[in-house]
Image: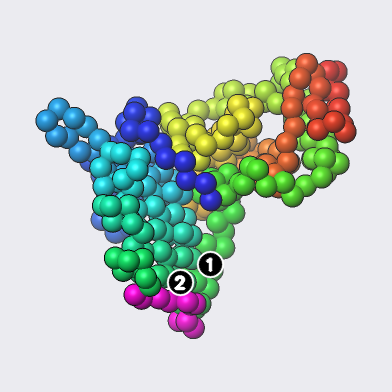
Amino acid sequence: MNDDILSSKFVIENGMDYEDFDTDICSNALLIPDTNIGFTGLVYEDWHNDGERGILYYCYYVDGFEEGAYIEFWDDEISKIREISHFRLGRLDGEHKKWDDNGNLVEERIYKLGTILKYRKYGKNGNIIKEKKEPNEEDLKNIKRQEKNFKTWIYSFSHSYHRIETIEWNKKQITNKEVKKLLEEYIQNIKDLKIKKNLILTNPFEFRFLTAFEKSIPKNAVDKNPTIERIKNPLFKKICICYLELCYLAGKGYDVEEVSTGKADKDAREYYKIYDPLIEIFEKGGSFEVVDGHVKVGNEFDIDFSDF
């Protein structure tokens, strides 16, 4: 997983200070003040000293719970990272590393939904002083219970965010022919929606659900976070933002009951898979280019959508 470190300037300009939120007494979820609504967006804590200001840590939150990378600093220098962890649905999940103030690695752990699978602790000379090589039977039971609790997770915004976060952009596992097929599927999906809803749209790759259906979500809820910032291709970044915006409305995060009770957006719930062909291309390391009414897939395929 790629953990590009965000600058203090970016975090402060686009994030929210942890101290500005309320906390749910039971779940410890981060709540928008004077509401019972979990916050979605970038959160940080900072320090102040003689007129200077820096970041202690930052993390992205989904519906009040940590999601994705958590980065903690010894101070405000990129080289002085204290800890990097990863969260999924508010639980530690994936790699966890700690360094001392001299930059020496002192601890490594692997988590699965809050359960430690493996760990190593290092001494001053880098030697291993404590180690767990594999999960025990009780660990596996805990993981199974957690997975059962989150069996409906696929309907949540957290699932969508995790899909984007775990994309390995430079690891190609798909042929250009397969990319072409998925692109054609996506273009047809948007064309069918355009006809059904009488949308004014000339380029399927400029489709944005929020604009087409006149919807809105909280400011910076999905577009200002570590996962989106590491996407270098402007078109792919835009597509991923549009996908997350749609899924935010469709799932409303952890409370999947909102779908059945009518609290989730019904239009979003109906079309939440419309970007899936493109996201699948990204997940498999595929690529394409959109130029003047055409989609180019390497030097092999050229899809014309000029009559879209």
Report the colour scheme. Answer: rainbow
Q: Provide residue 213's location: percent of width, then percent of height.
A: 61, 26
* Above or below for 213 versus 88: above
Disc 2 or 1, which lies upstream in sequence?
Answer: 2
Query: How packed is label 2: few (under 14 Cα within 10 Å), some, or many (20 or more)?
Result: some
* Above or below for 2 versus 196: below
Magenta stretch?
129-138
Three-letter amino acid code at the position of disc 1 = Glu
Query: How packed is label 1: few (under 14 Cα within 10 Å), some, or many (20 or more)?
Result: some
The residue under the point 41% across, 59% down is 96
- Please give the residue where the numbered disc 2 appears in the rendered image: 118
- Please give the residue where the numbered disc 1 appears in the rendered image: 147
Determine whether the residue tagged by mark 2 lies in a helix, strand or loop: strand
Residue 132 colored in magenta in the image? yes
User: Where is residue 294, by image quadrant?
Assistant: top right
The residue under the point 39% across, 52% down is 84
Query: Would residue 94 be visible to someone looking at this image?
Result: yes
Between 38 and 228, the one lying in front of the other is 228
User: Where is residue 109, by image quadrant?
Assistant: bottom left
Between 140 and 127, the one lying in front of the other is 127
Q: Provide residue 261's location: percent of width, then percent of height.
A: 52, 49
